[in-house]
Amino acid sequence: MDSDTGFYEAATAYCPGPSADNADRMARLRLIRSRRVGPATFRRLLAEHGSAEAALAALPEVAKRAGVKSYEVCSDTAAMAEVKAARRLGARMLSLGDPGYPAHLADCADAPPILWALGDTGLLTRPLLAMVGTRNASSLGARMARKLAGELSEAGFVIISGLARGIDALAHHAALPKGTIAVQAGGLDVIYPSENTDLAHAIAKNGLRLSEHPFGLEPQARHFPQRNRIVSGLARAVIVVEAAARSGSLITARNALDQGREVLAVPGHPMDTRASGCNILLRDGATLVRDAEDVIEAIGPAITTRQAELPLAKATDIPQQPERDWRDRAALNSRILSQLGHAPVAEDQLLRDLGMSPADAATELARMELDGSIHRQPGGLISLASGQQSGSGKKSP
């Protein structure tokens, strides 16, 4: 470790975080990369222990109390390898609570504690709109995506999407001259799909690419809903151009509603399955979009607001909770499991059913996430983990 001291300081300085202390930056990275620590648990651990370093020190004991044996936190070596990979690519770390972290996203309960950014981070201070849709766009859908993204970009908005084929790629291409933001499902150095490699390189030069995942991570199915909640969380509003009734685009729209964002949709023919999701959104109250003017009328003009003037949600803005007696914890654990099934429910609904405040349940929910008995999903949803039975901490045979 001593031989890496000079590089350690240079690399962490290259990746600014919420503190001037290099050790704090690395501790935050190690904490979120530790096993079974997600965004919600990250926040709660910081709230309970005051700093990432203290949370790391306490994490093995927390895991032990949750029934996880031989728990080890993410090593300093692994975190340093991630920082070195960032430096090779030219990426920058954005940490929750840092002035450079996107303010709208910071307001979300499941905001990623760490984002890797490649490109122009100044785009994050401009008015942001998300545009999503099917990977198999019709001719009319493709024309609409290009037209909307181009005109809204000219009007001063930065278009965000997920770098997927279809509507995503079309929106990125149309908005590229004025700057566009792509949120990736895997590591920043892994371009998926590969056909968008040239587009990804162009966005890095004249836009911004973001990912919450470590470098080298190949995207898997579970990573796409995680990406979608960042796409919607960054934006003032989400525009759905074409989407099937069951699609990732509708997941993004639901995330947007949970996050308090506007949802807008382009109508389509009732017999075109590629438009069925948009028509469902419109039936349920989404704003109908025919052109860029409809969008601007619904959400207002693009007025740039400096990041520093927006309220920042701090990673430690969670009430501290005193340690519970183990009998109380066991009883609460059973109550929570009794209310959960494998179909996800909103955390606020769970707390209402339990008659509890977020502060009262926060510590036990964090423990249950660590021990693998519950699973958190984007949009503030919670379900039983695979293999768990409702009302019991035992795994099913």
Image (cartoon, grey):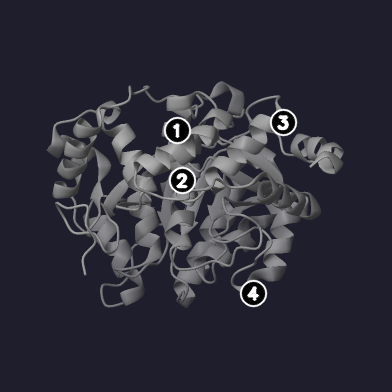
Residue corresponding to mark 2: 37
Q: Which numbered disc, 2 or 3, marks the residue that appears first in the sequence?
A: 3
Mark 4–mark 2 Cα distance, whole angstroms, equals 30 Å
Report the Cα–Cα distance between label 2 and label 3: 21 Å
Task: Please state which of the two labelled residues, at mark 4 or mark 3, is closer to the viewer.
Answer: 3
* Amino acid at the residue labelled 4: Ser
Q: Where residue 194 is drawn, which disc sits there?
A: 4
Mark closest to the chain's N terminus, 4 or 3: 3
Tell which circle, 2 or 1, labels the residue nearer the N-terminal end.
2
Q: Amino acid at mark 2?
A: Val
Q: Position of residue 215 (x, y in %)?
A: 66, 58
Q: Viewed as shown, does residue 101 lie left or right of 359?
A: right
Q: Secondary structure at mark 3?
A: helix
Q: Is residue 320 left or right of residue 152?
A: left
Residues under labels 1 and 3: Cα distance?
Answer: 20 Å
The alpha-carbon separation of the residues under discs 4 and 3 comes to 35 Å
Residue closest to the eye, 396 or 296: 396
Identify which residue, 397 or 148, lies in the foreground.
Answer: 397
Q: Secondary structure at mark 1?
A: helix
Image vertical order of residue 373 relative to residue 320, above or below: below
Q: Which residue is mark 3?
A: 22
Query: Which is closer to the viewer, label 4 or label 1?
Result: 1
